[in-house]
Amino acid sequence: MTTPDTHQAIRPRRNRKSSAIRTLCRETRLSCDSLIYPVFVHESPHDEEIDSMPGCKRWSPDGLLREVSEAHSLGIGAIVLFPAIEEKLKSTSAAESYNEDGLIPKIIRAIKNETPDITVITDVALDPYNSDGHDGLVGDNGKILNDETVEILCKQATCHARAGADIVSPSDMMDGRVGAIREALDEDGWNDTSILSYTAKYASAYYGPFRNALGSAPKAGDKKTYQMDPANAREALREASLDIDEGADMIMVKPAGPYLDVLALVASHVDVPVAAYQVSGEYLMIESAAAAGWINREDVIRESLTGIHRAGATAVLTYYAKEVAGWLHANKD
Ligand code: PBG
């Protein structure tokens, strides 16, 4: 047994002895400034609950305008738009993805009209528009066609920029798409439109609830020939240097929670901002455990987002963005 008079000069607990001191010593703070709110929209007058993502909605265009304006008043500075496209508009060529009168360009224009100061980020990938459910075009042999897809992604990105998107965000993982999109945007006069590239996007089972929300699951095969192998971390650095060389303004790691090591590695190697995406499966695991009464919902949400920031994320995409903004607004700690 240690004698009671053992001298213990260094006592880390002193920095934890009161809430005020803990606050003072805190290295990472949750703030609305770094939260990005992903939202779903569909061409329907009704806001619909999403079965696979309880608490999230597929918004009608009007419902989304209200939601975005509320989120903005709570301090959220940026949203990402995801469309649920009607089956009849999907095709193997995904041509709806660059229709100037399509759902996304229309909603961008409406948001820019209603809440002009919010940063609008759009997802650039073919899966919501592709009858095959893949992020790229599918060739005869079931292969995902890289260069043919990139051409369409360029049209899609330009179409979003014309409608007023501030940032386009390619989530498709085709090779060379960042450079091609940068060139296409610049040629069309959009050298001010930013690119947030999904750089280290893993072939993850955590996307399941999202695909259900958009009805965008692949009809055949999986996404493993383009999304990254979950076993690899160093490969993320290779993707990062390519994307940055090709002109990405910001890059992303996705999912976030199960890939904190990748996030920390990437963040320590690059000189551009690094976003992380707390994806639908991460959301759903927290929601289901909380609904069962097994965890404290708010504490786990705060801790999960703090962990993602601590690992090195400059910004975090989370379905909790608006709710957390409400908590931070009310100054609840
Ligand atoms: C597809 C896309 C996906 C997500 C964002 N963009 C799904 C996929 O790659 O299959 C997932 C987001 C989430 O799970 O919350 N371009």
Image (spheres, rainbow, N blue to C red):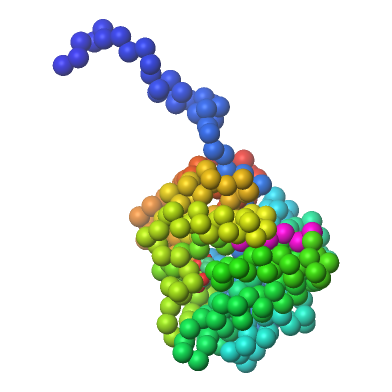
- Residue at (62% x, 55% y) in the render: 244
- Residue shown at 60%/68% (left/top)? 176
Residue at the spot x=51%, y=57% of the render? 238
Which residue is at the front of the view, 198 or 39? 198
Q: Is residue 104 left or right of residue 12?
A: right
Residue sitting nearer the eye, 220 or 247: 247
Residue 40 in the image, given as x and y percentages of width and height? 62, 71
The quadrant of the picture occupied by the N terminus is top left
Classify 261 as above or below 156.
above
Q: Is residue 229 above or below residue 298?
A: below
Indicate whether residue 52 is drawn in magenta. Answer: no
- Determine if residue 284 is in view: no
- The answer to whether residue 313 is seen in the rendering is yes
256 lies left or right of 148:
left
Q: Position of residue 325 (x, y in %)?
A: 63, 50
The residue stretch that appears in magenta:
192-197
Q: Quadrant of the C terminus?
A: top right
Depth check: give the residue in front, 85 or 139: 139
| Side (left or right) of 231 relative to 264 | left
> Residue 189 location, x and y as percent?
83, 67
Up the image or down, 81 lies above or below 301; here it is below
